[in-house]
Image (cartoon, rainbow, N blue to C red):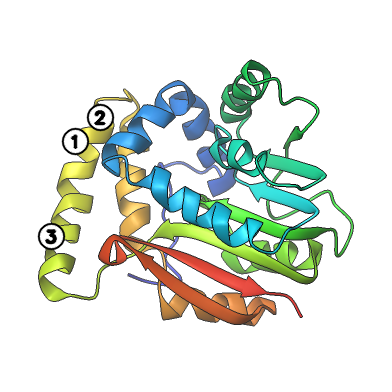
Amino acid sequence: MSDNKIILPDQASQEQKHVQVRKMFNSISGNYDKLNKVITFGMEKGWKKNVYNLVAAKSPNKILDIATGTGDMLLLFANSKASEIIGTDISEGMLAVAEEKVKQLGLENRIKLDQQDAENLEFPNNTFDAISITYGIRNFENLDKCLQEIYRVTAPGGQLIVLETSVPQNFILKSGHLIYTKWIMPLLSRMFSKDKTAYKYLSKSALNFPYGEALKKRFEQAGYTDVKIMPQFFGASSIYQGIKK
């Protein structure tokens, strides 16, 4: 794992990462929920509930879910007492799926969706009491710039909660995780996408993204304090929580 290695959906392409990522997620948006459920063996549902519990525990008034994808976190946040719930994503395809979910549940008045790039959020400073990112932060083109931008729109006393892939520390579990991520996950992903770049990228990005103390340090460099790491399923994924003083 290298903190500085940039993993692209198509390494041969001259397009910037955010452009490639948008196109890739547009291509798999219709099957993304099924894919995510399969490659995590359904466990991501419980992990997302853990994110919700951390957010809801502080009774936020304004919640932002970045890289909201198909909107699973937004539907959970609708159970909170927040007066404003917004989901942003760079992919119009993913947002279309999220919008359909919101409409089916009659939550149009509770949840708002907007296509935005996390590097240039269209919100004033100190806006949100809680910001979440679930399995999206590793897709950012410039991680540090995005974290700085997210910090900018976090209200004082507010928190950033991130759920992302990580690597178990136990040697046996780490070895099994490597085999699964490098070989099995791409095979499973192929079942849901004809786009070879998609399933290769999902595996490579998971293996190369900074995790644990390395990602905690990036939180702190952006300005967040009291950063906590909460491993999920022996560290196959981790939840990170940072506070803006």
Q: Is residue 133 above or below residue 87?
A: below
Would residue 11 be seen by someone viewing this image from the given angle? Answer: no
Question: Residue drawn at (62%, 22%), measured in percent from left and top?
Answer: 96
Q: Are marks 3 and 2 in contact (CB under 8 Å)?
A: no
For disc 3, the marked residue is: 176
Badge 2: few (under 14), some or many (20 or more) residues near its Cα, within 10 Å? Answer: some
Q: Earlier in the sequence, mark 3 or mark 2?
A: 3
Q: CA distance from mark 1 to mark 3?
A: 16 Å
| Residue in the picture at 23% in, 52% down | 181
Dot 3: what SS?
Answer: helix
Estimate the x, y position of residue 218 in percent, counting from the top left: 56, 76
Q: Which residue is mark 2?
A: 190
Residue type pointed to by label 2: Arg
Give the amino acid type for the residue marked by disc 3 in the picture: Gly
Residue receiving disc 1: 187
Looking at this rendering, what residue extends furthest in the left direction?
Answer: 172
Quarter of the figure with the N terminus: bottom left
Q: Amino acid at mark 1?
A: Leu
Q: Which one is in front in this view, the residue at disc 1 or the one at disc 3?
A: 3
